[in-house]
Image: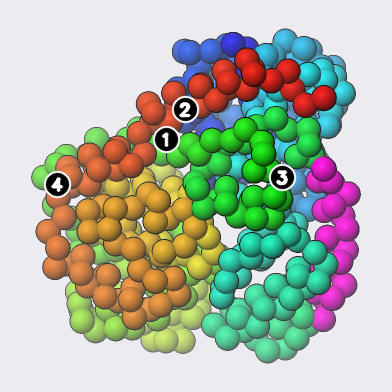
């Protein structure tokens, strides 16, 4: 099988890390070539070089945060060479170009986010509910107004800014929706199959675009083995007296929920510390100061080795997301190192954590329940090796690879591509 993997690499996020992991597993099983952006971040291109893959670059633009890969002769040669195209993240619009070059070539899109169903990806999945209806101008304005009001309530926006943003939403909402429809249009009709990283993610996509349910699809969890490149976990390594939040300042990740919980936790466990990664000099740190919270260390970006070392020694890793996480890489990475993860009950998170075995699941947006689960970590004697073993039962890299290969083979053998 000749596989052309398309990956923009403009950021090194969870989707790109998962793509690198899959490419490492794939490269000895199929012929792989990679098409990426000429302005991809160094960390991503270095990852490709380390794999020894044949890499081609094209000029890329950004529209509404979507990567637009421009045509050049190498694209045509690669498409004609390939048996199947793998869109690894949000490079959906290249499907139009590919079908013009080779009409019957099968295209598979890997879904790691909500970029296919909403122009404001995160905003539509608000603090109070998960949107399960097709995007419209009216709904996107309502959603953005709700987001601004919630941000104002938790201190991320002052009232003046919230009013300004609310006013702008009546103009920006319709504009973004119109541009998004022009950009994405009916691209799904040019894609032959879909891979979703969780059942939750797929269900939300089908709720927004019902006819997706008729397309070939498969649920494949991301390998999530990156920590093991830096750390060899030892079963009897003692846990440290701190917990880690590693999701940054994005309010949809729920850092303010954790801060509310920390008010009580820090009084109950006076020596316990909290590390909040990528939150230094942000609204998260400012809010913590307003609450006069202690025993919190705010950091900037932490390089991978130091990041995983910090995670490895932690008593627990917390991911208190408010939006429906498509997957939840951070909790699985913690489990790979034998560290329990405390996650909210939203999106794909409950699909990757075994309650009372690899961590705890708490009610989304509920500081009280989060307090209970953090304190419970110290009551339950977690065993590192049991967490590690259980994490590989939940997310098995070899199984994920075989699922991916089987799906590619099924698509190429049963479909000549969308006509």
Q: Nearer the viewer, residue 325 or 334?
A: 325
Pointers 1 and 2 in contact (CB under 8 A)? no
Disc 1 to disc 4, C-alpha distance: 24 Å
SS for tag 3? helix
Front of the two marks 1 and 4: 1
SS for tag 4? loop
**Where is residue 219 drawn, in percent x and y?**
50, 39
Front of the two marks 3 and 2: 3
Q: Which mark is residue 211?
A: 3
Q: Which mark is residue 77?
A: none
**Callout 4 environment at 10 Å: few (<14), some (14 to 19), or many (20+)?**
few
Q: Nearer the viewer, residue 197 or 293?
A: 197
**Callout 1 environment at 10 Å: few (<14), some (14 to 19), or many (20+)?**
many
SS for tag 1? loop
Q: Is residue 7 left or right of residue 368?
A: right
Front of the two marks 3 and 4: 3
Q: Earlier in the sequence, mark 1 or mark 4?
A: 1
- Mark 1 — residue? 223
Indicate yes or no whether the magenta region holds residue 179.
yes
- Mark 4 — residue? 237
Indicate yes or no whether the magenta region holds residue 355.
no
Q: Nearer the viewer, residue 116 or 301?
A: 116
Residue 317 shows in this picture: yes
């Amino acid at each position: 099988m000749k596989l052309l993997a398309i990956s923009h690499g403009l950021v090194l996020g969870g989707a790109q890390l998962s793509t690198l992991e899959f490419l490492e597993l794939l490269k000895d099983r199929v012929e792989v070539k990679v098409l990426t952006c000429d302005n991809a971040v160094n960390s991503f291109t270095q990852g490709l070089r380390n794999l020894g893959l044949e890499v081609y670059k094209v000029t890329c633009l950004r529209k509404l945060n979507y990567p637009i890969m421009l045509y050049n002769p190498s694209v045509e040669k690669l498409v004609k060479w390939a048996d199947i195209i793998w869109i690894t993240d949000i490079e959906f619009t290249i499907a139009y170009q590919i079908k013009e070059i080779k009409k019957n070539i099968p295209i598979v899109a890997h879904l790691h986010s909500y970029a296919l169903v909403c122009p404001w990806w995160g905003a539509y999945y608000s603090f109070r509910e998960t949107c399960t209806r097709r995007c419209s101008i009216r709904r996107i304005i309502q959603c953005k107004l709700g987001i601004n009001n919630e941000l104002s309530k938790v201190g991320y926006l002052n009232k003046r800014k919230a009013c300004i943003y609310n006013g702008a939403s009546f103009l920006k909402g319709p504009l973004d929706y119109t541009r998004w429809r022009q950009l994405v249009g009916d691209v799904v009709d040019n894609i032959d199959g879909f891979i979703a990283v969780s059942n939750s993610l797929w269900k939300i996509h089908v709720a927004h675009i019902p006819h997706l349910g008729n397309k070939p699809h498969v649920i494949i969890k991301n390998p999530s083995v990156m920590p093991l490149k830096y750390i060899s976990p030892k079963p009897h390594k003692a846990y440290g007296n701190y917990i880690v939040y590693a999701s940054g300042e994005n309010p949809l990740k729920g850092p303010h929920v954790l801060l509310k919980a920390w008010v009580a936790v820090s009084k109950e466990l006076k020596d316990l510390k909290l590390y909040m990664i990528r939150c230094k000099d942000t609204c998260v740190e400012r809010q913590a100061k307003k609450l006069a919270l202690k025993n919190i260390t705010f950091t900037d970006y932490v390089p991978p080795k130091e990041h995983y070392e910090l995670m490895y020694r932690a008593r627990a890793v917390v991911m208190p997301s408010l939006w429906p996480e498509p997957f939840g890489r951070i909790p699985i990475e913690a489990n790979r190192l034998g560290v329990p993860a405390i996650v909210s009950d939203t999106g794909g998170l409950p699909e990757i954590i075994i309650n009372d075995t690899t961590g705890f699941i708490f009610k989304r947006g509920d500081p009280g329940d989060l307090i209970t689960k953090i304190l419970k970590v110290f009551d339950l004697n977690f065993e590192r090796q049991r967490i590690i073993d259980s994490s590989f039962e939940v997310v098995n890299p070899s199984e994920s690879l075989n699922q991916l290969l089987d799906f590619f083979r099924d698509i190429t053998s049963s479909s000549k591509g969308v006509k």
